[in-house]
Amino acid sequence: MNIIASIVIYRHSYTDLKPTLDSLFLSPFISKIILVDNALSDWAENFKHEKIIYLKTNGNYGFGYGHNYAIKKYSKNSDYFLICNPDIWFEQKEFENFINFVKDRDESLFIPKVIYPDGENQYGARLLPSPVNLFARRFTSKFADKLDQEYLLKNFDLNKEIFAPSISGCFMLFRSSTLIKLGGFDERFFLYMEDIDLSRRCAEKYGAVYYPLAQIIHKHNQESYTNSSLLKIHLKSAFLYFNKWGWFYDSDRKKLNNRCLNQYSHKLT
């Protein structure tokens, strides 16, 4: 299996990326790592490794734009294409377990279990959000906790692979041929929601799978909760998403979410 990984950086230091790069360098499944620089870093262009390909974009036009830059140039040269955040790391045995699962599947998008460094679950597989889900999670934490039981699939015993209509963008493994057909990310999203949009499109046509028996670690600072500028970007992306797919009338959202929920034979009490 030939996998090309793409990482978009914006003013990241080498120290920031070292755990991610070391994990990817060690994997025999990763043939190349496309380092996409949305700003002119002081180290990445001159960083040398046999797996690294450096790309400088025309500017900071967003997360999806950066990954699309790599997808358009290199995805056709791989079996699978990995969208990877710069704050990910993993044990090699976990990644091997994940790849051994993926290679026997017919679907086109996969994610393992995603955890914080302290081991807490990040719930990388989710339902498609409604406006209530999304905005309540921001501004009414008590109500959000109640909604999250279903939205984040916390109510269910996730002990085997499942279909998931929304997958976290921190670690998305795509079948390359499908990613090309989908056209990559919708570049109208500068940051946030682009992963929900793309995983939704893939799940509906080609399938998307969460595999909880392998795991990766994601630092995930949730900066839009503390940075007002990023919060504005997140809200703008949310409005764009619901304008695209529908606010309160979105029949496909209901259909895909029900497909996910109907898989479970055991609901936690």
Image (spheres, rainbow, N blue to C red):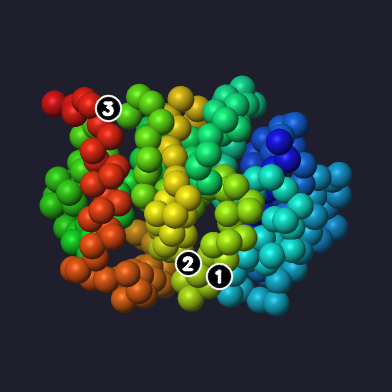
Give the CA distance from mark 2 to mark 3.
31 Å
| SS at badge 3 | loop
Residue 257, image x, y percentages: 27, 49
Mark on residue 62?
Answer: 1
Q: In the depicted view, which residue is nearer to us: 14 or 144?
A: 144
For label 3, the crowd category at 10 Å Cα-Cα, with few meaning under 14, some 14 to 19 and many 20 or more, is few
For label 1, the crowd category at 10 Å Cα-Cα, with few meaning under 14, some 14 to 19 and many 20 or more, is some
User: In the image, 236: left or right of 99?
Assistant: left
Give the CA distance from mark 3 to mark 1.
35 Å
**Residue occupied by mark 3:** 157
Residue 245, image x, y percentages: 32, 69
The amino acid type of the residue labelled 3 equals Asp
Residue 81, image x, y percentages: 64, 49
**Residue occupied by mark 2:** 191
Mark in the foreground, 3 or 1 = 3
| SS at badge 2 | loop
Mark on residue 163?
Answer: none
| SS at badge 1 | loop
- The structure residue drawn at horizontal position 61% and vertical position 73%, both measured from the top left corner, is 60
Give the CA distance from mark 1 to mark 2.
6 Å
Query: Which circle's residue, 2 or 3, is located before the other in the chain?
Result: 3
- The structure residue drawn at horizontal position 48% and vertical position 35%, both measured from the top left corner, is 112
Query: Where does the C terminus fall, quadrant-wise?
Result: top left
Q: To which quarter of the image does residue 65 belong?
A: bottom right
Query: Which circle's residue, 3 or 1, is located before the other in the chain?
Result: 1
Q: Circles 1 and 2: CB distance less than 8 Å?
A: yes
Q: Circles 3 and 1: CB distance less than 8 Å?
A: no
User: In the image, 79: left or right of 198?
Assistant: right
Q: Circles 2 and 3: CB distance less than 8 Å?
A: no
Query: Where does the N terminus fall, quadrant-wise?
Result: top right
- The structure residue drawn at horizontal position 60% and vertical position 32%, both measured from the top left corner, is 103
